Amino acid sequence: MKPRQLTLVLVLLLAVGNISEVSAQSWMKQLGKKAEEAAKQKVEEKVQEKTKKAVDKAFDEAEELAKQKKQKKPDVSIVEPADTGTPADNTSDWDNNEPYYALKKGAVITYTMYNGKGKVQGYNKSEVIELNRTKTSVKATVSGKITDAKGRVQNGGTFTMRAQSGNFYVNMLDVIPPKGLEGADFDASMTGNDMVIPTKLKPGQSLPDAKATLKMKMETGTDVMDMPPLEFQIFNRKAVRAEIVDTPVGQFVCFKLIQTVSADYPIVGTQQGTTITWIGKGLGVVKTEHYDAKGKLTSRMLLTGIE
């Protein structure tokens, strides 16, 4: 290349360099920003990977512990609440072979939920939307909705209720929704035996225990995570006596049932308490009270609406 031509090339390169200096600086800034973002993303991915491994390890340990406890009945060291209530003299209202639950199409029942101090926490409303009867059984599809004290929906869905040869069967999955998972995207399956409420009850009668294992798969972003199983046991179930229960919609003769409830939550541990339920013929649950292991009232639910 001739000196003149070389000089021209250098001049052109210098000119191009001067013209593109600002663009080059901008490009370098963008490149640095992208490099910083890439490094940050890499660190986040490593943190997520370590967190996932730690969570998986904790879940595996919890699942192994649950398996070890599965065959054992929980050690019970709870204080049973005082036996209060108004005994019913005439018990014919509950001993006439009438189903305990309101299995009538279109029936709408509303409960008000309170905390241990009597403050309204929300409402539980259910409606029988479909009913199938045979000579010996009844199966109902029920639409339920739980709202907070301001009427905001917290949970809802449909579930089934069934009565066979006069006995009422309760699916544990329908009565023990996973707490703290409202709004989460998960699939749940449950194994175990249903809770049974016989047609005929008498004071002091022992009722069958119920046990269930709840397994869940939760979607977290793009992953599906197997949650450790939740173990539930309901035992020491017994029928106490017929009592009169006052509600805003009337006075009812009910049978009082008491039972011990044990919930084994992975990582958190086992929680126990006592649940007392008053059930009325043709109505189902009229009132429930839950007490902690020390015998302190923690929550209450009362029938407040019938349509």
Image: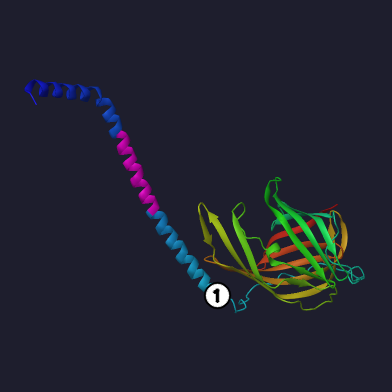
Residue 30 highlighted magenta (yes or no): yes
Q: Which x, y percent locates residue 285?
A: 79, 63
Query: Which amino acid type corresponds to the residue marked 1 in the rendered image?
Result: Lys
Q: Does residue 20 appear left or right of residue 135 in this picture?
A: left
Magenta residues (range): 29-45
Q: Which x, y percent locates residue 140?
A: 80, 61
Residue 279 highlighted magenta (yes or no): no
**Residue that extends furthest to the front in the rendered view of this protein:** 1
Considering depth in this image, is 128 or 210 the residue closer to the camera? Answer: 128
Q: Which x, y percent locates residue 133?
A: 86, 64
Residue located at (85% from left, 56% from top):
105
Considering depth in this image, is 113 or 210 the residue closer to the camera? Answer: 210
Residue located at (83% from left, 62% from top):
132
**Residue 305 appears in the figure:** yes
> Mark 1 — residue?
67
**Residue that extends furthest to the left in the rendered view of this protein:** 3
